[in-house]
Image (cartoon, rainbow, N blue to C red):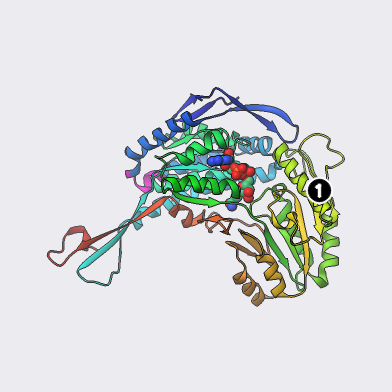
């Protein structure tokens, strides 16, 4: 039972006194409860974050902030096994994948510790301007109080992608995790409480639903920055809320990413990346390569191999040995993906494999790895984000056709291309409307590299230095020198 929120450096009861059930998606059992935070809780958290920001925090050096970030990284690493098991219980993903996420989360805090230190050296860099009488320098200031709203597919990792750069930049924050998966965010708050000695109010956590806790955070007048990851409709609502008081906003939204496989591809390697691109994390991945475009000549053999491999995937509880596919996160998500599978069948797509509940599992939100071929480009399964283990396939006969099909989507998060022809790989990569393009692979994600989408997949980039810039204001300070050059301004 987690009936408390972490506000102003202390655990505190929610104003609402209501609780939300935590359900293990593999067993459908209620395993815990979390507080259903509300507007009053958000208000308290924002006041605490604002107080901390206006206090000494905004003036701390990057090197000072790096110390806290490294403590968080170490505590996550030290509690890796516990955190990973919580993630399995909350989200359903297989334990090895959860362990991978937790290590990535620790790595993210460590990485932004380095960038925080690097920020000190960049402060006041002189830039060349076209008039000798003036000297211009650039400073990077933290934006202020940040509202961080995250989804349920990578619970701790998504928190890390936002909390780490926000703290590195010198901002303070209120984290609102998904009401479906808040357990590791609560552990993160516990880590901050127990092992980090972070000044109070810098990190605050309010659990609760989108309507009761997310919306008041998005509209709060004292929140200067909103960083949101989630679905396109909610992203639109958050952006609308941000517009009311002209908040800085970054959005990481959904996708319907293509993977294009050309005739000259190594088929066995292509099969591996296709499988990884759609069945990892039950397909609940924003960048999942959920549309397969395969060139005519290799299509029969590639699809035969895909079917064989998909049917070998071991489905079960995330902590069972050898399991590669766990349950979907919730009854709601199970119903949503099931509706899409039905829509695919109704629209006349050919079901190559899967399409239902695995026969050996009568409880839990389990679905088989599912592949549809001959998918109509107008059908909902081709056009909309399913966010489950469902691959939609079409064939193509020319590079132009493949590129056009790949780009024919309102989304633009990621894309993958598999081919032996280097020139073509580069040419097609440049032609695709996607923020991330993988060549001869799918899904590798690096903390150092920019992450984010074009079109309806979002605004801005997380990770790398781009992730830090999300939380910084850029200030130019320009001095007039002709009368009397002075002090620090003329030093190079
Ligand atoms: P969601 O949009 O339903 O919820 C995301 C978060 O927003 C949750 O914390 C929710 O409580 C909150 N929320 C809901 N209504 C709100 C409101 N009115 N105001 C403020 N906050 C509100 O998304 P989800 O179902 O949790 O996550 C799945 C979606 O996230 C998918 O579309 C997926 O593609 C996307 N996603 C994108 C990325 C990326 O990096 N681009 C990464 C992970 C997930």
Relative horizontal placement of residue 485, taking residue 41 as reference (left or right): left
Relative horizontal placement of residue 273, taking residue 103 as reference (left or right): right
Residue bearing the label numbered 1: 342
Determine the quadrant in which ligand 1 lies. top right
Residue at 68% of width from left, 70% of height from top? 404
- Give percent across and percent down for residue 290: 71, 56
Q: Residues within 10 Å of mark 1 (few under 14, many from 20)?
A: few
- Above or below, 112 against 147 in this view is below
Q: Is residue 229 visible?
A: no
Query: Callout 1: helix, strand or loop?
Result: helix
Type of secondary structure dominating the magenta stretch: helix
Residue at 40% of width from left, 40% of height from top? 221
Q: Quadrant of residue 9?
A: top left
What count of labels does the image hold?
Answer: 1
Which stretch is magenta?
59-65
Relative horizontal placement of residue 224, taking residue 492 as reference (left or right): right
- Give percent across and percent down for residue 197: 42, 34
Check the picture and name the quadrant holding the C terminus: bottom left
Q: Is residue 360 visible?
A: yes
**Viewer-side residue, 77 vs 360:** 360
- Give percent across and percent down for residue 99: 64, 43
Q: Residue 39 magenta-drawn?
A: no
Residue at 24% of width from left, 71% of height from top? 131
**Viewer-side residue, 104 vs 468:** 468
Residue at 55% of width from left, 48% of height from top? 235
- Above or below, 337 against 203 in this view is below
**Viewer-side residue, 146 vs 261:** 146
- Above or below, 267 against 180 in this view is below
- Residue furthest to the left in view is 483
- Give percent across and percent down for residue 55: 32, 37
Check the picture and name the quadrant holding the N terminus: top right
């Amino acid at each position: 039972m987690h009936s408390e929120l972490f506000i102003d450096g202390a655990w505190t009861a929610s104003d609402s006194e209501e609780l939300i059930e935590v359900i293990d998606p593999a067993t459908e059992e209620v395993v815990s409860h979390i507080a259903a935070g509300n507007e009053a809780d958000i208000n308290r958290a924002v006041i605490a974050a604002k107080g901390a920001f206006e206090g000494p925090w905004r003036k701390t050096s990057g090197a000072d902030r790096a110390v806290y970030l490294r403590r968080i990284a170490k505590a996550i690493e030290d509690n890796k096994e516990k955190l990973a098991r919580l993630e399995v219980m909350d989200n359903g993903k297989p334990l090895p994948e959860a362990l991978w996420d937790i290590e990535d989360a620790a790595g993210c805090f460590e990485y932004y510790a380095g960038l925080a230190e690097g920020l000190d050296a960049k402060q006041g860099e002189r830039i060349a301007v076209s008039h000798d009488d003036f000297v211009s320098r650039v400073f990077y200031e933290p934006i202020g109080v940040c509202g961080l709203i995250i989804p349920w597919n990578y619970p701790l990792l998504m928190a890390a992608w936002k909390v780490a750069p926000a703290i590195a930049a010198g901002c303070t924050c209120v984290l609102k995790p998904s009401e479906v998966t808040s357990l590791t965010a609560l552990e993160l708050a516990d880590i901050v409480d127990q092992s980090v000695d972070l000044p109070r109010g810098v990190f605050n956590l309010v659990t609760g639903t989108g309507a009761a806790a997310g919306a008041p955070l998005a509209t709060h007048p004292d929140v200067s920055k909103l960083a949101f990851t989630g679905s396109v409709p909610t992203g639109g609502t958050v952006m609308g809320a941000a517009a009311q008081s002209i908040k800085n906003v970054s959005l990481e939204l959904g996708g319907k990413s293509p993977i294009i496989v050309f005739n000259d591809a190594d088929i066995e390697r292509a099969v591996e990346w296709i499988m990884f691109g759609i069945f990892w994390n039950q397909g609940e991945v924003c960048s999942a390569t959920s549309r397969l475009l395969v060139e005519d000549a290799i299509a029969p053999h590639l699809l035969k191999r895909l079917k064989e491999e998909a049917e070998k995937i071991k489905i079960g509880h995330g902590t069972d040995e050898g399991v590669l596919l766990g349950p979907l996160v919730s009854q709601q998500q199970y119903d949503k993906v099931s509706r899409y599978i039905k829509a695919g069948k109704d629209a006349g797509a050919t079901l190559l494999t899967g399409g239902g509940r695995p026969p050996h599992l009568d409880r839990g939100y389990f679905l088989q790895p599912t592949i549809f071929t001959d998918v109509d480009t107008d059908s909902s399964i081709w056009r909309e984000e399913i966010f489950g283990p469902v691959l939609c396939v079409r064939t193509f006969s020319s590079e132009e056709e493949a590129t056009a099909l790949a780009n024919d989507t309102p989304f633009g998060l990621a894309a993958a291309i598999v081919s032996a022809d280097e020139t073509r790989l580069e040419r097609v990569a440049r032609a695709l409307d996607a923020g991330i393009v993988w060549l001869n692979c799918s899904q590798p994600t690096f903390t150092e590299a920019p992450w984010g989408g074009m079109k309806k997949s979002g605004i801005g980039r997380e990770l790398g230095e781009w992730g830090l810039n999300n939380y910084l204001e850029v200030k130019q300070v320009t001095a007039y020198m002709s009368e009397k050059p002075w002090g620090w301004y003329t030093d190079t």
